[in-house]
Amino acid sequence: MNNFSYTQAKNRDDAIALSGMGPGSQFIAGGTNLIDLMKYNITRPNALVDINAIEDFHAIRESANGGLSLGALVTNAATAYHPLVEQRYPLLSRAILAGASAQIRNMATNGGNLLQRTRCYYFYDTNTPCNKREPGSGCPAIEGYNRTMAIMGTSEHCIAVFPSDMSVALAALNASVQVSGPEGSRNIPFSDFHRLPGNTPHIDNCMSRNELITSIELPANGFSNHYSYLKIRDRNSYAFALVSVATGLELEEGVIKNARIALGGVAHKPWRVKEAEDFLQNKEPAAENFWYAAEMILKGAKTFQFNAFKVELAKRAIVRNCIMALNPECQLPGAQASA
């Protein structure tokens, strides 16, 4: 690990000012991903600005529009078990509890969850080239062992996937991200927050330098009656998704009035296809309609030597999860919390 300075910020403005004092500074909160990146010599900050003492970021509050505001520094565990989240956004609670381990969820923060980096093997192996780690060096995953890699939205420069479970649910819920920086505060729709790799795979999201996440804003509609999160992985605890699906449905007189389907484990960001969600409107909640929507979502998938199985896996996961969303209490192992 390299030498770095460490400073504690007292409030938001203090944090922004401290982070602007040097080009190699980074914010740290739970540190569950950042410390790993530093140990692997992937990230080499020369200054860490600890934001854990900023009280304003530690609360979950009801919003004036009927939604909920999740403080950036609330832990994943505290968010998942918060009574208002469990009652009004059970999809989010289920997704968070499907991620990582109980110990990590107790440390990881909401803001940090959105900023975690890919778990691509080549990204973490500093003996190999990686465009995400060192732009222009190459992407050995394309011709290498790519079983866990992306099948949607890839580029010739990167096929890594985004690992967050929480973000898949936030995408389905149409959340937004409140950030602050030297130029002021702004609200970013969740669909615009993370990026596809394109020619700049080293850039994961649309935040500017020295900006920090202050909260995650949830709209009033939490799909609390018909929801499901399904995570398919190699083992049932402490594993990242091969494919995950977050589904929220609104039903009226036996037909679907509103549908949200977001996929994880298939792209550089949570993946939604509005055309498929629109198709389901005013349709019966039947397996054949969910299968047609799944075909629309996976249209254009590009596979590689070892991950072609993900296309069929994703389609079947979508259908299964939509059916489980009709009766959330029926959810089976694979949709339950990690130990």
Image (spheres, helix red, strand yellow):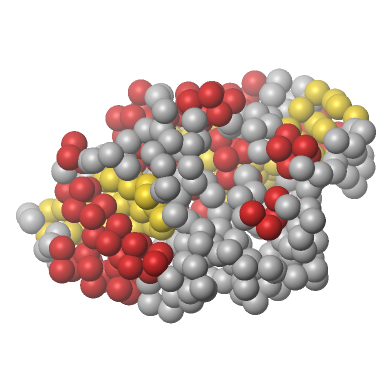
Residue 28 visible in image: yes
In this picture, is 7 found above or below 277? above
Instruction: Say which of 293 and 144 sits in front.
Output: 144
Residue 137 placement: quadrant = bottom right
Estimate the x, y position of residue 179 in percent, counting from the top left: 65, 44
Estimate the x, y position of residue 44 in percent, counting from the top left: 85, 43
Q: Viewed as shown, does residue 89 lie left or right of 288?
A: right
Q: Viewed as shown, does residue 117 lie left or right of 263?
A: right
Estimate the x, y position of residue 35 in percent, counting from the top left: 73, 34
Quarter of the image for the C terminus: give it.
Answer: top left
Instruction: Say which of 210 and 237 sits in front.
Output: 237
Estimate the x, y position of residue 93 in percent, counting from the top left: 38, 34
Q: Viewed as shown, does residue 253 lie left or right of 170?
A: left
Quarter of the image for the N terminus: give it.
Answer: top right
Instruction: Say which of 68 and 161 sits in front.
Output: 161
Residue placed at 52% from the left, 73% from the top? 304
In this picture, is 215 found above or below 251? above
Residue placed at 66% from the left, 38% from the top? 33
Residue 197 visible in image: no
Residue 309 placement: quadrant = bottom left
Residue placed at 76% from the left, 60% from the top? 128
Q: Viewed as shown, does residue 196 lie left or right of 85?
A: right
